Image (tube, coloured by chain):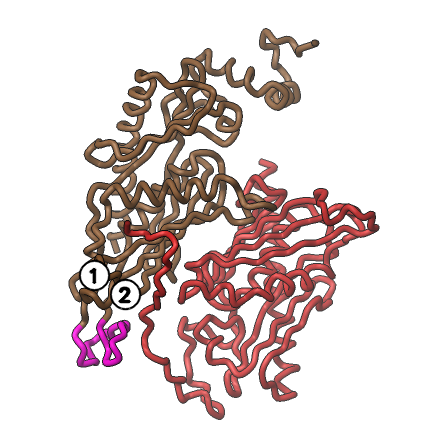
Amino acid sequence: MGLPNASGDLSTEVELDAFRRLFPLRFFEKHLLESIRPDARPLGRARDTTLSLGAVASANGSANAKIGSTTMLAAIKMEVMTPSLETPDEGCIAIDFHMPPIVRPGRPAEAAPVVAKQLSDTILSSGMINLKELSLVSGKAAWMAYLDIYCLYADGALFDAALLAAVAAFSYLEIPVVSLNDDGKIVLSEEQGLSDREPVNKEKRKVNLGSIPFSLTCILHKNYILADPTAEEESIMETSVTVVLDSSSQLVSLYKPGGPVLAYTSAIQDCIALTRQRVMELQMILEEAISGMEVD
Amino acid sequence: MAAKPGSAPTTYSPNLGQKTRPPIFKDNDLDWVRPDGRGFHQCRPAFFRTGAVNSASGSAYAELGNTKVIVSVFGPRESKKAMMYSDTGRLNCNVSYTTFGTPVRGQGSDHKEFSSMLHKALEGAIMLESFPKTTVDVFALVLESGGSDLPVVISCASLALADAGIMMYDLVAAVSVACLGKNLVIDPILEEESYQDGSLMLTCMPSRYEVTQLTFTGEWPTPDINEAMQLCLDACNKLGKVMRTCLKEAASASQE
């Protein structure tokens, strides 16, 4: 069939766009041969990442993470619950991921519950938050932290951006000072100690974070490994590997959901090496964002 | 084991005790200062930006004080519901809140009527005959609720529709006024809305001087109704100019 001069005569804009849409895989492979991607990134580089904290004033902690164009807004609201009998000293975290209709109209996206479960498992098993810190009165009251992450723009690497936003929201979390009132309920404490009730958690305004997890999603295609895919790349080349490392470079989770490409050990090790670099970048970005907020 | 699936423990928010209504809203106490220092007839500074979401046909982000709204428009596109032939297009609106947008978690579901109110506010302004047999979807997400949510959603939605290139008779601007005792306060914040005796929301097309939607609630003495409507119309005019400037900037920025 008549290919528009497949040897690369893509001089006019119109032909380039048409080629990109009609033969997406060939379009990408032409770039991969030169070790570059259509947005001029080298294969192993992630997109520009920005983080801004405290975007939502009505929440106890919030963060807005952008990886390239993918934008996630995470916010934490603290409510009080009665701890269960088996764990009277522990609070609880409820994590939920939403893809609101502004991003994808019609049926809810298939990716949303998958990412929600991945996030939930990763955050809870990474040991970032010690649930005992969320306890208020042993056996009677503990914090339930509702973490909600909304995707405002989906352009690939949803899990990475969501995890970054979640972690940043936790690091910027401010727990309100509360005290126990006479009915046995927890209420917000007045500021100047007007009430005669002792605040239950005067010292615990911030949560101490243990090892913070960071992640990187890579796409495997033939012999190439592409870090931080865009939505276009994800839809064309379907094998993705997500590696989550914590700040001490220990492996928290490895996720490879099927796909046409089988990953040999060497490929996995390359992915882990790329993730290790990314962890250092992300740590710096997170620290800069936090210290930026402290300069009041 | 921390997130026990299936057993959702009941939680409550540690709110401060009942806020007693400040006793100054009786007679004409004009010394009261609004919590954010504005005058009674002063709206919050408005920030609009179009083109926030590229995957949609058009989108806009609006921020007035603490109220932050993002609206996406998809279409005109075919939909199963519009399979029957009709001369006019369909408009489908949906307003949803984030769970953390309200001071108490989950209060956003109290505002289910906003979707149909948004529909009524916009349908008068859109030229539905210009896209027969197809549907235009307008989705609004309130990221943070800081008072006067629906007027901000309506203004932002009309900007998103303009960004999507949907033909309209005019931009739609909306403003609300709260009646606190004898005082008329424009563009109330959440705290003022909780004390109000009555509220008026007016949605109009500023250049045509036509009102698309008018909603009164509560008690209103007759002379105040006229004053409030005039206040709203003036404010809508100014808001319309701000929205127009935003669109012009976006258009000239894309031309460069």
**CA distance for labels 1 and 2:** 8 Å
Magenta residues?
A: A179-198
Q: Is residue A250 above or below residue A294?
A: above
Under mark 1, the amino acid is Pro
Q: Is residue B80 magenta?
A: no
Under mark 2, the amino acid is Thr
Q: What hue does chain A carry in this figure?
A: brown
Q: Position of residue B254 (x, y in %)?
A: 59, 38
Q: Is residue A250 above or below residue B216?
A: above
The reply, left or right, for residue B72 in relation to residue A202 is right
Question: Mark 1 — residue?
Answer: A88
Q: Is residue B116 above or below residue A255?
A: below
Q: Quadrant of residue B80?
A: top right
Looking at the picture, tell me which residue is in the foreground, B228 or A127: A127
Q: Position of residue A24 (x, y in %)?
A: 57, 21
Q: Residues within 10 Å of mark 2 (few under 14, many from 20)?
A: many
Q: Residue at x 46, y 15 (%)?
A: A32
Q: Position of residue B58 (x, y in %)?
A: 61, 45
**Can the viewer see residue A216 in this picture?**
yes
Looking at the picture, tell me which residue is in the foreground, B29 or A31: A31
Could you tell me which chain the residue with mark 2 belongs to? A
The reply, left or right, for residue B32 in relation to residue B223 is left
Q: What hue does chain B carry in this figure?
A: red
Q: Which of marks 2 and 1 precedes in the sequence?
A: 2
Quick one: which residue is furthest to the bottom in this view? B27
Question: Mark 2 — residue?
Answer: A82
Q: Residue at x 70, y 9 (%)?
A: A1
